[in-house]
Image (tube, helix red, strand yellow):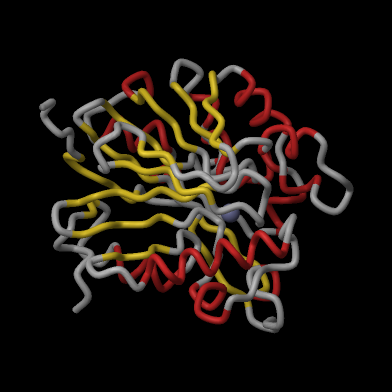
Amino acid sequence: MPKSKTIRRVWALDAPTITVDKSILLVGSGGENVTVPAPSFLIEHDEGLLLFDSGLASEAAGDPAGAYGPLAAMFEMHFPEACRLDRQLEALGFSTADVKRVVLSHAHFDHTGGLQHFPHAEGFIGAGELRYARNADSHTAAFFRNQDLEAAARIQWNELPAGYDHDMFADGSVTLLSLPGHTPGALGLQLRLEDRTLILTGDAAHVRENIDNTVGMPFDADIVNKLDSLRKLKLLKTRPGTTVWVNHDPQDWEKLRSAGKEITAASLQPA
Ligand SMILES: [Zn+2]
């Protein structure tokens, strides 16, 4: 029997932030500003480095308006140089060229900024996501950045059909989760860390209340699929030994990184 491959280390990399009215994240809320991380997760696996999402564009560090124009003020982007994806990879002893695989939760600008660094990587994305991004209507066009879509065009993507999960190495260590609705190809990522399962939601949920109350956000592409995906996450949360990490949720960010940027089964244990 082939030896099962494992995840060696996981990092929730230091992230730039954006600040929005809560109504953008949760239908029915509002009137309070929420500052949320735009994260990237790095996974060192026996099969090589894997990146989940790529945050904001490196050239926006220190000068978000230079890279994003009016969006920088609209989303109150805060992006210190230390949060650059390329620099953080170097600080961990890697280079961008070492990243063999990139999983994109979806094509909104706060997830695609770093794709420019990985034209050599094998990509994983939900089916129809790039077509949706390239044909955005006036309601959603501001969420896509042309330079990032050009960078995406240089990556060879494997497309995961909606409704199917995908066990990447056929050993249960890394599983792509189909969570459509926010966008047609929205994905989450499930990681097996020793005795704990970590589920990264991408933007299938933006804050915990989306899952707890089965409520979407105002820019969801398909609300029926979105609510199904929220119910799927709610069900997965009930599994023993499972942590569901809502990637933009500021409380999850603080709590689940309380032991630092390196994430382990032990650091995810509830206090
Ligand atoms: Zn997002």
* Left or right of 142 on screen, residue 103: left
Task: Name the residue at 18% across, 55% down.
Answer: 264
Image quadrant occupied by the N terminus: top left
Q: Position of residue 204 (x, y in %)?
A: 56, 58
Q: Position of residue 41 (x, y in %)?
A: 37, 45
* Left or right of 235 on screen, residue 191: left
Q: Position of residue 83 (x, y in %)?
A: 42, 45
Dividing the picture into quadrants, the one containing residue 206 is bottom right
Task: Name the residue at 64% across, 21% down.
Answer: 153
Q: Residue furthest right?
A: 138
**Viewer-proximal residue, 217 or 175?**
175
The quadrant of the rendered image in which ligand 1 is seen is bottom right
Task: Name the residue at 36% across, 23% down.
Answer: 100
Task: Name the residue at 17% across, 33% down.
Answer: 5
Query: How many circles with numbers are drawn on the protein?
Result: 0
* Left or right of 85 on screen, residue 270: left
Above or below 223: residue 84: above
**Viewer-proximal residue, 163 or 73?**
163
Image quadrant occupied by the C terminus: bottom left
* Left or right of 70 on screen, residue 37: left
Q: Position of residue 187 (x, y in %)?
A: 52, 47
Dividing the picture into quadrants, the one containing residue 255 is bottom left
Q: Residue furthest front?
A: 1
